[in-house]
Amino acid sequence: MSGYILAIDQGTTSSRAIVFGKDRTIAGLGQKEFTQIFPQDGWVEHDPEEIWESVVWAVKTALKDAKVEAKDIAAIGITNQRETTLIWDRVTGKAIHNAIVWQDRRTAAYCAKLKKAGHEKLVTRKTGLLLDPYFSGTKVRWLLDNVKGARKRAEKGELAFGTVDSFLIWRLTGGKVHATDATNAGRTLLFDIAKNSWDKGLLALFDVPAALLPEVKDCADDFGVTDPALFGAPIPILGVAGDQHAASIGQACFKPGMLKSTYGTGCFALLNTGSDMVRSRNRLLTTIAYRLDGKTTYALEGSIFIAGAAVQWIRDGLKLVKHASETGPLARTADPSQHVYMVPAFVGLGAPWWDAEARGAIYGLTRNSGPAEIARAALEAVCYQTRDLLDAMRKDWKGGGDTVLRVDGGMVASDWTMQFLADILDAPVDRPVILETTALGAAWLAGSKAGMWPGMKDFAESWARDAQFKPRMEAAERKTKIKGWDIAVRRTLTQ
């Protein structure tokens, strides 16, 4: 066995597959975008078959790019867009409806009804989450109530529920394994993160039959082997984690107090709190960072729904640029005397506001405002939102203290954005050599389980920094900019 590890990174806008060599360098890569479906205002869906086909294509392309075959792969690690919800037929493997994406807000009214009835306190105590359409539980209920015959079939055990990881495991193993890991289970509103088990009371609250549920495993565990017909040889699946948890692992944030933020379609900051399950007083989420050898490590998380998606909107919606990479250089040319703010609430606002009904807005426009000012506002918005999350984390957990922020995701390639982030946070920002940290985290889970990659300590010591951005903005300027942002957010909130 040559010791190659394959990471499948199934994201919100594309599916990626990366072949890592023994030295943890990238040997081959495949990536394919897929369709974003918007049936109504605030609704977001994906075609499950298109997701599956993009994953298979990406894996085959990565193997070809690395000049290896399936028999050369020691193990597969899977990381996925979290909360996106599917229900499929246990016999055919076909989904009964499009996947409902984590960004989808169709269950906002139902969440509001549950809140009004006083259920949020119990839900938060058990799951660490809030009653928001973001999470999977209300999406499952919607599918059961709105797809003809689904509820009766679910109660008979004919259907299976899963987040994208479960759906991929089912398909990859030819329907032999219905499983998920603790990080994905912990984002469903159905899983007690203290007891590490599905909760009967929550299942009853959301009216979800237990027969739908997958088995919950550790992040590094045996998830079966792939059907040999897919890639030419069976490959063990030995690692699974939701994308933000995998990124935290890839950033080697193994010690309490370590903090990472990933800038993809959305932005997600995770603060490792160790065995301490911190209860947020500032509308952050308490979540499972990872579970290894039966031991759970927790984190505080702040979730921003729109980050790179705002850049995608500037490219595809406004057509101000042809390529996302042009946004940073365009922002550099913006008029410094203009104070334009974008609040990217295209699908509501996440932490720490949790306003499902808010919608995007741009403030401060003048006749002189143009593409450069809008591009700058979009990039700056991500940084302002990150600052709001970090402020909330420091208030919730004194063990965090002043820390360096480790960053990853597509947006961090922009030096301009990372410098503004350091400036507005008034804290150092570290960008790693390997930017594919989400895939790297999934690969480490699988590689370490297979005995091919180093353990946690040695892996952490191998983490390498590409660049550090230190704050250089004057305090008065920072204060003025933050004040303008706070005003823009208050004007946007509906609650």
Image (spheres, grey):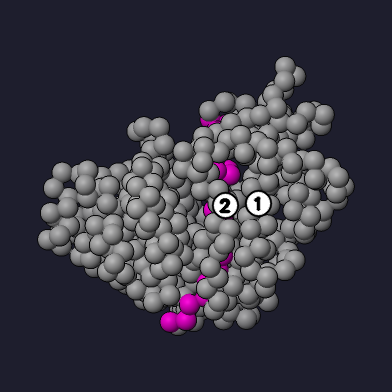
Quote the CA–CA distance across marks 2 and 1: 7 Å
* Residue type for callout 2: Pro
Tag 2 and tag 1, C-beta contact below 8 Å? yes
Q: Nearer the viewer, residue 441 or 73?
A: 441
Residue 265 position in % (x across, y down): 53, 46
Residue at mark 2: 352
Left or right: 152, with 110 as reference point: left
Q: Nearer the viewer, residue 268 or 435?
A: 268
SS label for mark 1: helix
Locate residue 453: give its quadrant: bottom right
Is residue 305 rendered magenta in the image?
A: yes
Residue range in magenta is: 294-316
Q: From the viewer's perspective, is residue 329 above or below residue 176?
A: above
Residue at mark 1: 388
Numbered tag placed on residue 242 in the rendering:
none
Q: Quadrant of the N terminus?
A: bottom left
* Residue type for callout 1: Asp
| Residue 490 seen in render | yes
Residue occupying the point 57% across, 62% down? 281
